[in-house]
Amino acid sequence: MLSEIERRELEDAVKSYPDKRGAAIDALLTIQRRRGWISDDSLLEIAKFLEVTAEDLDSVATFYNLVFRKPVGRHVAFMCDSISCWIKGCEQVQEQIKKLYDVDLGQTTSDGRLTVLPIACLGQCERAPAVMIDQDVYGDVTPEKIEQIVEKYK
Amino acid sequence: MERPLTQHIHPDGTTRTLREYVKEGGYRCLERLAAGLAPKDVQRLVTEAGLRGRGGGGFRTGTKWSFVPMGPDAPKPKYIVANGDEMEPGTFKDRVLMEGDPHGLVEGMILAGYAIDAEIGYIFLRGEYHLSAQRLNQAIAEAYAEGYLGKPLPGTGFRFDLHLHASAGRYICGEETALINALEGKRAVPRAKPPFPQTVGLWGQPTIVQNVETLYNLPHIINHGADWYHRLSRTQDGGTKIYGISGRVTNPGWWELPLGITARELLERHARGMADGVRFRGLLPGGISTAFMTEEHLDLPMDFSSIPPEIGRLGTGTMIILDDQTCPVGFVLNLEKFFARESCGWCTPCREGLPWVAKLLTSFEAGRATSDDLSLLEMHAKWLAPGHTFCGLAPGAMAPLQSALKYFHDDFERHITSGGCPWSRKSAQRRILV
């Protein structure tokens, strides 16, 4: 069941569009902010609110990189692997994360602290390689610096 | 040298406030609208200024607007959409503008809305740009409080509403019809054209989708006129351009410069040449959907008119540099993996062809490739060329591949003859050194 606060946030989101369905992405991201990810139950509740079928909404939810249809850790590290970051050694940074936290791309650490995902170009190419943890962006990352950065996220 | 788009952006990364924006001439062109500048006058000024789309296509803004039905019988509402889904690898220019000067986009949107008589605007922002979202939301709230938005503008009767839409990360949303589907809350696959969005777009209404940097130019054209705008540029297209360079150069970054500056000036003067120990081999002039250019092209003006189509196109103007310590095949493999991952899957050549290309390139890197694989790559460049796919994604993906096969053919051959990537041992050493 949508909580009172969640319902209010969704009602606010649909105001920007001439029909409710326009707010599909806003609604998915709003509920994800509160619940961490989009479970089947969450999907059904949102679909009902938006007056679309769950299947239809799932075709939207599964399309996007930032909508999680599986549980993620308390923090998510998005590793930019596009060309400017690749030239500057993003693969070495990712290898270092794997070594330090025993977690590969698409996986979550066993303590549920950190999920590591690849991400398309973060638009930080002048300070490549770049990593985004939750909503914070870090540039000029090196294998040496990455531990210090990740350690801020417990 | 004038830098109208960026001269007031704070170098320390903080945002330009509403107060500063207004003090430095912001929102002043709304007074010109009040003084009698009609939508058709705005359209004429922009056409005369020779403004061309900064998202990569270089389409003439005035021409784009001219397809929108105008007058009392035109459908209502009409929409104007800022395309801020900046996901083209190597491209970061719109982020610089939105973070540094969010009110410039609000004012640009009001003007574009006025020019085509669209009363509702959306800023379609990629989901990863959290700082841009935060600053744009604040700017929009301030513009409502000041009455620039949400109330009839004095002397015109024109009222404009503006919404920010934060997306959830998918490259195809930068394609204008996919973007329209995304805004409608549908799966973001491209639509068939015609009908074109200018007549049948968002929720079936006339819609203009315009790149963020393009919109930032509008207030300056209205304030200073078409002649001034042409004088900013070195070529027949008007204005400045935000250029950028990434890769192994001494000083990667962005610079607002006259349109038509050469790649050599950008690389040598602004990026201060290649980084220590590496040499220049080639560049992608603007994002990864553009063709490689090499040493022989460095003196071409970087604009929409001077690069011959058989060589390539400017794209977004943010260059990625290939150096001699980086494997060109590995470089192209990285690009094709990106395209394969970001294909929306709607049409078969793109959905099936791009993973195949990535697989072939992987076999080169792994030392399993034969000369048949080289021909297969060349065939793909034809099979996925313009006209064979539903939208421009796969043809864009073929531009760097096809040009790499042309300029770096020997390197592809060496992967076959030496049974693997000649760079891999070198790059392993470099990793230890760096």
Image: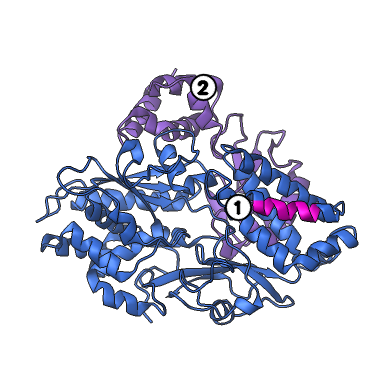
Chain colours: A purple, B blue
Q: Which residue is mark 1?
A: B385
Span highlighted in magenta in the image: B373-382
Residue B378 within the magenta-colored segment of the rendering = yes
**Residue B268 in magenta stretch:** no
- Considering every residue shown, the one lying at the far right of the view is B418
Asked where in the image residue B398 lies, by quadrant, the reply is bottom right
Q: Position of residue B300 (x, y in %)?
A: 54, 78
Q: Position of residue B249 (x, y in %)?
A: 64, 73
Look at 37% across and 22% down and name the residue there: A4
Q: Quadrant of residue B3 in the image?
A: bottom left
Q: Secondary structure at mark 1?
A: loop
Residue at 37% across / 30% down in the picture?
A9
Q: Nearer the viewer, residue B52 or B141?
A: B52
Question: Circle 2 sits on which residue?
Answer: A55
Looking at the rendered image, the quarter that the C terminus of chain B falls into is bottom right
Residue A25 visible (yes or no): yes
Picture layout, residue A89 above or below residue B206:
below
Kindly identify the residue that appears in the image at 42 percent across and 19 percent down: A48
Residue A96 location in percent, x, y? 75, 52
Q: Amino acid at mark 2?
A: Glu
